[in-house]
Image (cartoon, rainbow, N blue to C red):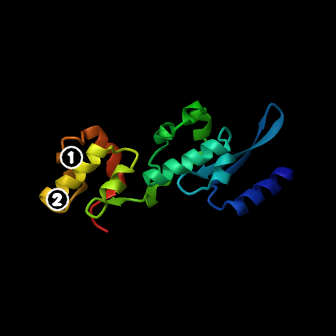
């Protein structure tokens, strides 16, 4: 009964929590909470076993810098998070990438591009220079013509860009 009340309370407080399970571990009851990584706040992330307030804040900062997570494979990219048992944590996290914040390549500034975690200054500058030389980007794939954007980097950054609003 105690867990049912706690479960209901958590679902009311954090409506984006997908699932709460009650399990027995060594004859102790434990709640496993499933949170959505792209929408939850630090309080909800702390409820995931193994994520302390520091890692929750690092996760949210990185999520905001990225524009959202695409997959759990990005989780180890967060500074300091490599110390967490990713397998245990991943069973409690889901990712809905349908609302990523995308950068419009035709209107974004050099500083804005440079602040993206996957781009360095030279790559950001080359994206801006290419647009200035060739007019607006028509397709995201156009950035593959830039020497500093190899296929590996392109696959990593493409989901975060758009060419039209």
Q: Nearer the viewer, residue 19 or 153?
A: 153
Q: Position of residue 144 (x, y in %)?
A: 21, 46
- Please say if the residues under marks 1 and 2 sit with CB atoms less than 8 Å apart: no
Q: Nearer the viewer, residue 119 or 8?
A: 119
In the current view of this chain or complex, which residue is farthest to the right? 1
Q: Residue at label 2?
A: 132
Residue at point 77%, 41% (across, down): 30
**Left or right: residue 128 compared with residue 6:** left
Q: Is residue 92 visible?
A: no
Residue at point 40%, 45% (across, down): 117
- On the image, which quarter does residue 163 sit in? bottom left
Q: Is residue 30 above or below residue 61?
A: above
Q: Nearer the viewer, residue 66 or 26?
A: 66
Mark in front: 1 vs 2: 2
In the current view of this chain or complex, which residue is farthest to the left? 134
**Pointer 1: residues within 10 angstroms few (<14), some, or many (20+)?**
some
Residue at point 37%, 59% (across, down): 102
Ranked by sequence position, the earlier of labels 1 and 2 is 2
Q: Secondary structure at mark 2?
A: helix
Q: Is residue 75 visible?
A: yes
**Pointer 2: residues within 10 angstroms few (<14), some, or many (20+)?**
few
Q: Nearer the viewer, residue 35 or 42?
A: 42
Q: Secondary structure at mark 1?
A: helix
Q: Position of residue 49 (x, y in %)?
A: 68, 40
Residue at point 66%, 45% (across, down): 53
Q: Residue at label 1?
A: 144
């Amino acid at each position: 009964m105690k867990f049912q009340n706690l479960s209901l309370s958590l679902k009311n407080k954090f409506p984006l929590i997908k699932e709460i399970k009650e399990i027995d571990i060594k004859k102790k009851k434990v709640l496993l909470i499933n949170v959505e990584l792209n929408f939850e706040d630090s309080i909800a992330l702390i409820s995931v076993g193994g994520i302390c307030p520091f890692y929750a804040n690092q996760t949210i900062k990185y999520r905001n810098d990225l524009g959202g997570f695409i997959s759990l494979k990005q989780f180890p990219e967060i500074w300091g998070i490599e110390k967490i048992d990713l397998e245990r944590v991943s069973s409690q996290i889901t990712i809905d990438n349908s609302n990523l914040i995308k950068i419009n390549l035709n209107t974004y500034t050099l500083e804005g591009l440079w602040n993206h975690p996957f781009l360095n200054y030279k790559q950001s500058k080359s994206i801006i220079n290419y647009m200035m030389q060739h007019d607006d980007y028509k397709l995201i794939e156009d950035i593959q013509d830039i020497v500093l954007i190899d296929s590996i980097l392109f696959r990593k950054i493409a989901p975060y860009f758009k060419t039209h609003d």
